Amino acid sequence: MKPSAYLINCARGDLVIEEDLYQALKEGKIKGAAVDVLRKEPPDKNNPLFALNNFIVTPHSAALTKESMDRMGLHAAMGIHAVLSGGYKPEPDALYRAI
């Protein structure tokens, strides 16, 4: 990566070797990093990455916004209504495909 690069990981904590990331950030091999996942969850409060000013960590909580919770509730209610009103007709093997 270029020294001007930023690493962003919002996928899985095991994708990044934190010791290597720490060294790259500390030595200026990359400009910065932002993650919302770490190898150890919950993270150790003494994680050396937390002491760096070019490292940002945020909660992995995209589904916990007010808007997403409202939509989940709305879609749950719509599903209940569809079942109770007879409008939901599942395919015979839909349950097996969902598992």
Image (cartoon, rainbow, N blue to C red):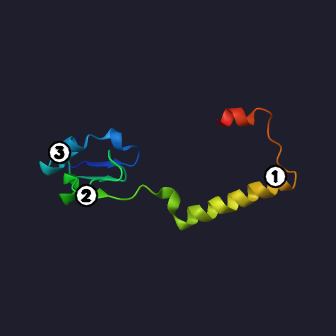
Q: Position of residue 41 (x, y in %)?
A: 36, 50
Q: Is residue 52 in view?
A: no
Q: Earlier in the sequence, mark 3 or mark 2?
A: 3
Image coordinates of residue 26 in percent, x first then y, are 14, 50
Please give the name of the residue rendered at 19% of the width and 53% of the height, measured from the top-left corner: 48
Kindly identify the residue that appears in the image at 26 percent across and 40 percent down. Answer: 17
Q: Is residue 33 left or right of residue 80?
A: left
Mark 3 residue element? helix
Q: Earlier in the sequence, mark 1 or mark 2?
A: 2
Distance from Cα at disc 3 to Cα at disc 2: 20 Å
Q: Amino acid type of disc 1? A: Val
Rendered location of residue 98, percent (x, y): 66, 37
- Residue marked by disc 2: 45
Camera-nearest residue between 3 and 36: 36
Q: Along the line of sight, which residue is nearer the eye, 66 or 3?
A: 66
Numbered badge on residue 83: 1
Crowd tier of the residue under label 3, counting other residues whose Cα lies within 10 Å: few below 14, some 14–19, many 20 or above: some
Q: Which residue is the site of mark 3?
A: 24
**Rounded to the nearest whole Å, what is the CA distance between mark 1 and mark 3?**
54 Å
Residue 46 placement: quadrant: bottom left
Q: Nearer the viewer, mark 1 or mark 3?
A: 1
